[in-house]
Amino acid sequence: MYRILEAEIVRKGLNKKILAKDLGMSYGTLLAKLKGEYSFTLDEAIKFKKVVHVDMTIDDLFARSQKAISN
């Protein structure tokens, strides 16, 4: 699970369906990736950072929670 990504989405008041479209992926794919079922590619991570206008490193932004890592 990508808790920091989720927090940034909420903090900025973004709609996940619109965000998915802006990222060029389906809503279901975005949800699965946010849950940690699939990994984000580097290109997707860079695009996410640009689309959401986040001022932190990709490493920090895409840090996974311990729970997701242990699964």
Image (cartoon, rainbow, N blue to C red):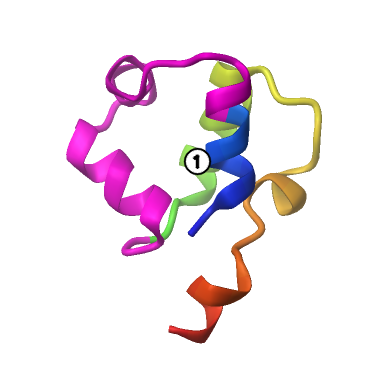
Q: Where is residue 17 in the image (x, y as percent from the top left)?
A: 27, 21
Q: In this view, does 4 lie to the left or right of 71?
A: right
Q: Is residue 17 left or right of residue 8?
A: left
Tell me what residue is drawn at x 53 percent, y 39 percent: 6
Position of 44 relative to 39 (above/below): above
| Quarter in which the C terminus is drawn | bottom left
Residues shaded magenta: 9-38
In terms of secondary structure, what is the magenta stretch mainly?
Answer: helix
Tag 1's secondary structure? helix
Displayed quadrant of residue 28: top left
Reply yes or no: does residue 53 show up in magenta: no
Q: Where is residue 32 in the image (x, y as percent from the top left)?
A: 28, 52
Tell me what residue is drawn at x 26 percent, y 32 percent: 25
Q: Which amino acid does label 1 sit on?
A: Asp
Query: In this figure, what is the number of numbered marks?
Result: 1
Position of 32 relative to 51 (above/below): below
Q: In this view, does 59 lie to the left or right of 15?
A: right
Reply yes or no: does residue 36 show up in magenta: yes
Which residue was labeled with disc 1?
43
Displayed quadrant of residue 20: top left
Q: Position of residue 56 (x, y in %)?
A: 80, 35
Q: Residue furthest bottom?
A: 70
- Depth check: give the residue in front, 44 or 60: 60
Tell me what residue is drawn at x 38 percent, y 25 percent: 23
